[in-house]
Amino acid sequence: MAVGVVPESQERRHYGGRITAFVVLSCITACMGGVIFGYDIGVSGGVSSMDAFLRKFFPEVYEQMQADTGVSNYCRFNSQLLTAFTSSLYVSGLVTTFLASSVTARYGRRPSMIVAGAAIIAGAAVGGASVDLSMVILGRVLLGVGLGFGNQAVPLYLSEMAPPSRRGGFSNGFQLCVGIGSLAAQLVNFGTEKIEGGWGWRVSLAVAAVPAGLLTVGALFLPETPNSLVQQGKDHHRVRVLLRKIRGTDIVEDELDDIVKADRSNKTSTRSGLQMIVFQRRYRPQLVMAVMIPFFQQMTGINAIAFYAPVLLRTIGMGESAALLWVVVKQTIGVGATLVSMFAVDRFGRRTLFLVGGAQMLASQLMIGGVMASQLGDHGEVGRRYALVLIGLIAVYQAGFGWSWGPLGWLAPSEIFPLEVRSAGQGIAVAVNFLLTTFVAQSFLAMLCGMKAGIFFFFAAWLVVMTAFIYLLLPETKGLPIEQIGELWGEHWFWKRFVGCYNPETLGNYTTLVD
């Protein structure tokens, strides 16, 4: 038996039903939250490499970039103000996450999505109309508020609405939409960079209002998830009717019973979901995963490349338009890889994609670092042949992320928590994601300046650590109903010492060691 895989020792209930048009349309609408997240990640890197934007808000960086000075290639874009423009969104999202977790648990997933869309519309309007740096950063802060609510609610919504046998594919749709949003940002940046008059960056920042508007309007008509309705104390007959509509079958009693049992365990505790996760030993495996998986997702180095790919490509000597065009190609590859993941994750499992994708990214990072170290010094440019090699390696890296840590970094935390602590657990995962995203955004250009090509070996070392972590400690959740995943921890070779041994006589009942 492979390390990290739990035995199929108990018979578990598998629900009936099929994929209905109703649930597909609901999840597509919810995924607009992923489009917004991807767009905001992608647009900042492109905008911050546009000459007109730099001249208006970061003249020192623009002058340094244009001047033939002795500044190292690796340090040409190093500016704390420039990184503050990028990271202000994620600081705002981090702070918002704690409020969003409470709102999502108490009032449901749908209200949080409405708040997310409204805040992002406001942020896009302020950003597009900016006349000084303070307005630009205010717009980013408002976008961060929206992402804090959206990233809290949308992954939970997808995991709870999806049929168990296809939950991985539906949940990976969030990352597909992130990729589509990022691709849209690159296409918009490529087009607006050519606008005469130097106002193209305004269009790039303002377009975020389009998917936000779709999310806001769509969320007004979306149903709440059955799990959230039970958690809010709604009538069980209403939940049963919704389940029948979602699953396309009248046989929903087993699923409803599991949801009610999961909610009942919450009613017996006087602690909040966050207190339960942090202080009760039986939730230790989920807490570790909620912290470490988002942490590792950021330490793959993906956001360093996503934020600053245009800047990185200009560092090796590419022109502004060419750099933006190659980023479009790279992102298209990432979207294609995530689409593959949607179909593969419920067939091959989460662990397989994590391990294969991790190995692919590790090899790519090592080769990118090797080429940069050998071919790009402090001055001069990389030769055309090696520049093409770097572009190819970045594309291979993007594909590896696209079918592994990209979608699975959101899927795993959203499906492993029992209902009583699910919103709080997702809040922890989103907070860690924002915290590390802020760190990478704020520090990458300084690290690139200080470590030079060594930064890619830095991320490669983390890829070794995270691949070993998945192999040893993450059980496979493929095909299990979301309210039965908690059983896995009591069967796992390592985690059972924390949660106790699973008792198959009663669903979700453990011989717990201590709280």
Image (cartoon, helix red, strand yellow):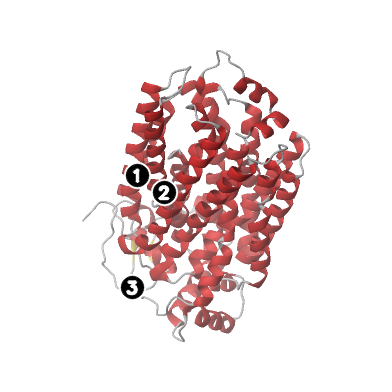
Q: Going from the N terminus, do you reach mark 2 or mark 3 first?
A: 3
Q: Are marks 2 and 3 in contact (CB under 8 Å)?
A: no
Residue 38 position, x and y percent, is 55, 50
Relative vertical location of residue 115 with respect to residue 95 in this rendering, above or below = below
Mark 3 crowdedness (10 Å alpha carbons): few <14, some 14-19, many ≥20: few
Q: Quadrant of the N terminus?
A: bottom left
Relative vertical location of residue 257 with respect to residue 460 in this rendering, above or below = below
Q: Secondary structure at mark 3?
A: loop
The residue identified by callout 1 is 358
Circle nearer the viewer, 3 or 1: 1
Identify which residue is drawn at 46% across, 65% down: 170
Q: Amino acid at mark 3?
A: Arg
Q: Is residue 508 visible in the rendered structure shown here?
A: no
**Count of numbered circles in the view:** 3
Residue farthest to the left, as pictured: 1
Q: Amino acid at mark 1?
A: Gly
The residue identified by callout 3 is 12
Q: Amino acid at mark 2?
A: Trp
Label 1 to label 2, Cα distance in Å?
8 Å
Residue 137 position, x and y percent, is 71, 39
Relative vertical location of residue 100 with respect to residue 250 in this rendering, above or below = above
Residue 76 position, x and y percent, is 56, 23
* Res. 405 mark: 2
Circle nearer the viewer, 2 or 3: 2
Q: Secondary structure at mark 2?
A: helix
Q: Going from the N terminus, do you reach mark 1 or mark 2 first?
A: 1
Label 2 to label 3, Cα distance in Å?
28 Å
Return the residue nearer the eye: 125 or 412: 125
* Res. 236 mark: none
145 lies left or right of 243: right
Identify which residue is drawn at 64% across, 64% down: 106
